[in-house]
Amino acid sequence: MVEAPLILGVETSTRLCSVAVSRGMEVLAEREADEDRLVHAEKLHGFFDEVLKIAGVSYTDLSAIAVGIGPGSYTGLRIGLSAAKGLCYALDTPIIGIGTLEVLCAELQQRSAVDPSLELMPMIDARRMEVFTARHDASGQAAEEVRAMVLDENSMRVPIPVLVFGDGADKAEALWEDHGHVTHVPGVRPMAAALCMLAHRRFQQGAFDDLAYLVPAYGKPANLTTPRRGA
């Protein structure tokens, strides 16, 4: 009997720093930190060691490493992908990049069954009243490309029932009260455990990413400014 793949999952696209290890569809261990400041750089590698120790496995036992590739925080995505790539290179292990909106949908589905008639709109905070989002069907399949959207009283006037969730939706909680077709599900975050479940399916399909060319999907260009002359 072939043993199920052992996958290390890394999710750092938001303020949440989440790491998990799974054997097939079973999560063996997970750790996360969600603080007011970004703690990914100081927590991530320690979390790697901790989840592997709890699971009773070693780095060399890993079948693949899965990482959330965004959209989301520029800094968080760079830290997570760099760490995942470094491990894959050192261990000669495949890498699997998973979109963070897809992870949010998987996390929602793990909480409870989703009515198939509903549309899903996972939302990731993009500062101020802007979010990264894309319409998904109830199974979590994307129906459009990821886009940046400004939330206001007119942005979600939709004719069909929609679930909105993620930290982008949570910051606009008061807005959803005026939208009859929109239901807000609070507290949904892109957990590494959900990412591992998606990565297991990708592993079974042999759908790995190219280690050299996998890059973050930031959602929009970085807001760079040119220094003033003499500054």
Image (spheres, rainbow, N blue to C red):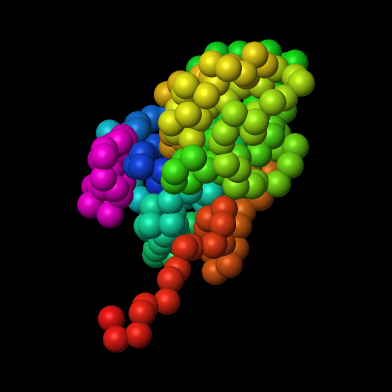
Q: Which quadrant is the N terminus positioned in?
A: top right
Residue 122 place in picture, x, y as percent? 57, 32
Q: Nearer the viewer, residue 190 or 195?
A: 190
Q: Main secondary structure of the magenta part?
A: helix
Identified at 62% across, 18% down, the residue is 179
Identified at 61% across, 53% down, the residue is 208
Q: Is residue 190 visible?
A: yes
> In the displayed structure, does residue 145 sit left or right of residue 93?
right
Residue 80 place in picture, x, y as percent? 40, 53
Q: Is residue 2 magenta?
A: no
Residue 219 place in picture, x, y as percent? 57, 53
Q: Is residue 109 visible?
A: no
Identified at 36% across, 39% down, the residue is 16
The magenta span reads 31-53
Depicted 53 relative to depicted 78: above or below: above
Q: Nearer the viewer, residue 146 or 172?
A: 172
Residue 209 place in picture, x, y as percent? 60, 57
Name the residue furthest bottom: 230
> In the displayed structure, does residue 116 sit left or right of residue 184?
right
Depicted 37 relative to depicted 109: above or below: below
Q: Is residue 42 magenta?
A: yes
> In the displayed structure, does residue 97 sit left or right of residue 186?
right
Q: Nearer the viewer, residue 138 or 179?
A: 179
Identified at 36% across, 79% down, the residue is 228
